[in-house]
Amino acid sequence: MITPAQVQDTLRRHLLVDGYDFVLDLDASRGSTLVDARTGTPPGPASTRRALAFPLAVNEAANRAAEDAALHQARDAFAAAPHDIACVLVEPIQGEGGDRHLSARFLQELQALAHANDALFVCDEVQTGVGLTGTPWAYQQLGLTPDVVAFGKKTHVCGIMAGGRLDEVPDHVFATSSRLNSTFGGGLVDLVRATIMLDVIERDGLIERAAKLGEVLLAGSSDSSSATRWSAASVAAA
């Protein structure tokens, strides 16, 4: 018989980088994915810091070393408990604890590691999705093919998209009628509102606009030698 303590111990054996890069299921269920304000510690075992340090050109070697250390720890976690890790969950850009970026190389290595160990690769695009980065989904700019993508916020409804790897499991939740019906059946008004929002985004070219403004902001912020001043008028003129 499996005890609650055993379940809790299994849930706690997850990848967690500084309390940000990986979400511990036990705490994620109540949103506690950041460092505990009371103790100053993440909700799980701390590991190598992974968010990119800027400027990138100055910190290239340090960033790569930190990535390699984090990937080594991830491989060790899979080796130690190959049957306990169901998925690798990442945010392409972490916005809750600051503007924390992960490199395409790092994320691609994590995706390959997940697939090599028969785990799902899941992208949390609740904050980055629906055109915010200049493409419908941030993962499209990072050379990733996630198995599951979570979205929400800007659509006023939340949900997930799932790819073909789920079809490797017979009678999975998307293939069997009513497996998610009562809780996730959706509300008609919410679905209509979300559809209208997507129509406006497409009609007004807001994704293309985000890409254009992103280039303007990146060019200005990258020039550390100039005292660039931003105003609503200057951005609107771009």
Image: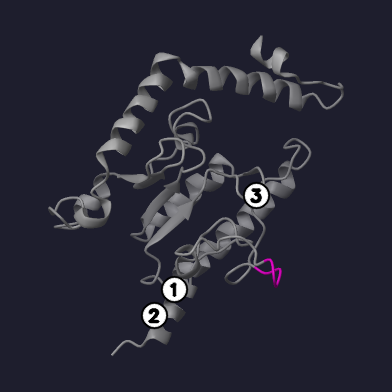
Q: Residue at x 37, y 63 (%)?
A: 86
Question: Magenta stretch: residue 40 in it?
Answer: yes
How many angstroms separate mark 1 from mark 3 (CA)?
Answer: 24 Å
Say whether disc 2 or disc 3 marks the residue closer to the N-terminus.
Answer: 2
85 w.r.t. 223: above or below: below
From the top left corner, tell me how far across and down residue 222 is, in percent.
Answer: 75, 26
Q: Secondary structure beneath disc 2?
A: helix
201 w.r.t. 104: above or below: above
* Apparent side of residue 177 relative to residue 49 in the rendered image (left or right): left
Amino acid type shown at disc 2: Val
Pointer 1 residue: 11
Amino acid type shown at disc 3: Ala
Q: Quadrant of the C terminus?
A: top right
Can residue 238 be seen here? The reply is: no
Which of the 4 image quadrants contains residue 219? Answer: top right
From the top left corner, tell me how far across and down residue 38 is, in percent.
Answer: 69, 71
How many angstroms separate mark 2 from mark 3 (CA)?
Answer: 30 Å
Do residues under tags 2 and 1 come within 8 Å of each other at their CB atoms?
Answer: yes
Q: Nearer the viewer, residue 232 or 4?
A: 232
From the top left corner, tell me how far across and down residue 67 is, in percent.
Answer: 62, 52
Pointer 2 residue: 7
Neighbour tally class for label 2: few under 14, some 14-19, many 20 plus, Cα within 10 Å:
few
Counting the numbered discs, the total is 3
Pointer 3 residue: 51
**In the image, which residues are magenta?**
37-41
Neighbour tally class for label 3: few under 14, some 14-19, many 20 plus, Cα within 10 Å:
many
Do residues under tags 2 and 3 come within 8 Å of each other at their CB atoms?
Answer: no
Q: Residue at x 60, y 45 (%)?
A: 95
Say whether disc 1 or disc 3 marks the residue closer to the N-terminus.
Answer: 1
